[in-house]
Amino acid sequence: MKKLILFSVFALALVMTTSAQSFKFGAKAGANFASLNGDGADGFDGITNFHFGAVAEIGISDKFAFQPELLYSAQGASFSGIDLNLNYITLPLLAKFKVSEAFSIEAGPQVGFLVKDEILGEDVEADSFDYGLNLGLSYTLDSGLFFQGRYSLGLADIAEDADAKNGAFQLSVGYFFL
């Protein structure tokens, strides 16, 4: 099922490039400042982690673009100094509004597939699927180097019977190869 979803998204992106004004492909990496939100997250503190992956930008017009990404994103929280690690493969699907040639506003949904969940090296029973919304800003240089700041608001509880959702502020740097 996961492979079918990923294949469908990338097939859609490939089809869209045939009529798109421009296409860029690159890589990005950065820091996650992650936490848990909700009534069941009382007492949890944020943790700093990382993300990395691939990014594409498919131009639709001079002002709009579609930006799918495929990222490995380490998230979670800390409770009394003990880290809860929740690592996902995420697929943000962003609409990008270009305010100027270099500056953009990004927003869109995200799905995530849990690949690792642990506390002190022991597995925990987190849900294998996550989803949420992203809102952020980006600045791209003529050289292809870009910088992003984004907040990812989780909408799904991290586990059954837990009123706790992921939240992560992400700072990224990347480069468009094409």
Image: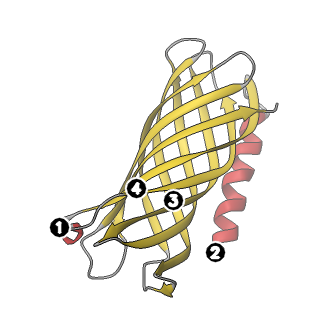
Residue 54 in the figure: left or right of residue 167: right
Q: Residue lying farthest top?
A: 100
For the residue marked with disc 1, what is the amino acid?
A: Asp
Q: Residue lying farthest right?
A: 178
Which residue matches tag 2?
1
Looking at the image, is mark 2 or mark 4 nearer the viewer? 4
User: Considering only order in the chain, which callout, 1 or 2, is on the residue closer to the N terminus?
Assistant: 2
Residue 175 in the figure: left or right of residue 78: right
Kindly identify the residue that appears in the image at 58 percent across and 30 percent down: 147
Residue 47 rendering spot, x and y as whole percentages? 40, 59
Contact check, label 3 and label 1, Cβ < 8 Å: no
Image quarter hosting the N terminus: bottom right
For the residue marked with disc 3, what is the amino acid?
A: Val
For the residue marked with disc 4, what is the amino acid?
A: Ala
In this orientation, which residue lies closer to the viewer: 9 or 125?
A: 125
Residue 60 found in image quarter: top right
Residue 9 rendering spot, x and y as whole percentages? 66, 53
Residue 116 found in image quarter: bottom right
Which residue matches tag 1?
39
For the residue marked with disc 2, what is the amino acid?
A: Met
Residue 131 found in image quarter: bottom left
Q: Secondary structure at mark 2?
A: loop
User: Considering only order in the chain, which callout, 4 or 2, is on the residue closer to the N terminus?
Assistant: 2
Residue 27 rendering spot, x and y as whole percentages? 72, 42
Looking at the image, is mark 4 or mark 1 nearer the viewer? 4
